Amino acid sequence: MTYWLMKSEPSEVSIDTLAGQPGQTIDWFGVRNYLARNFLRQMKLGDKAFFYHSSCPEPGIAGVVEIVREAYPDPTQFDFHNPHFDPKSPKDNPRWSTVDVKLVSKVELLSLAVLRTKPELAGLRLLQKGNRLSVTPVEPQHAEILERMLKRI
């Protein structure tokens, strides 16, 4: 099993939004960065991800999710009325992918500020200068540390 970190703006999809979905499952739509897309395409059933609230007053890890459907074409790329519409994405070879995630647990917010205080997390991609990717892998040693730090609610 691989661990990932997946960022979402709470105004778009929050951990509470996910918790309120049928089956507590949602597709991780709207990724429009090629490297992040490639990471989505590497995800396997049963992989876990830290659900991270970004671009908000207090960013941080808000929950844990499980990958329950591997990569498939993101339908928002073909929806003219959707802000994630991509007129250059061909239907016969879609440019963008999504995965389905299911809520494993909500956690007490583990803030970015707290994460930055942990020297043992210095190599975590999230904490690297200039990293803005919405989907990143998490090294096993970092996943273990993060799991120990989480307070499930």
Image (cartoon, rainbow, N blue to C red):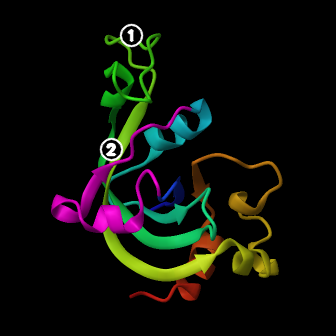
Amino acid type of disc 2?
A: Glu
- x, y (%) of residue 52? 53, 63
- Which residue is disc 2 drawn over? 70
- Which residue is disc 1 drawn over? 90
Query: Residue drawn at (77%, 65%), measured in percent from left and top?
Result: 123
Considering the image in quadrants, where does the C terminus appear? bottom left
Left or right for 123, reference 1: right
Amino acid type of disc 1?
A: Pro
Is 52 within the magenta? no
Q: Circle 2 — which element? A: strand
- x, y (%) of residue 79? 31, 22
130, above or below 57, in the image: above
Left or right for 26, reference 53: left
- x, y (%) of residue 88? 47, 10
In the rendered structure, which segment of residues is drawn in magenta? Answer: 11-32
| Residue nearest the observer in this picture, 57 or 97 | 57
Considering the image in quadrants, where does the N terminus appear? bottom left
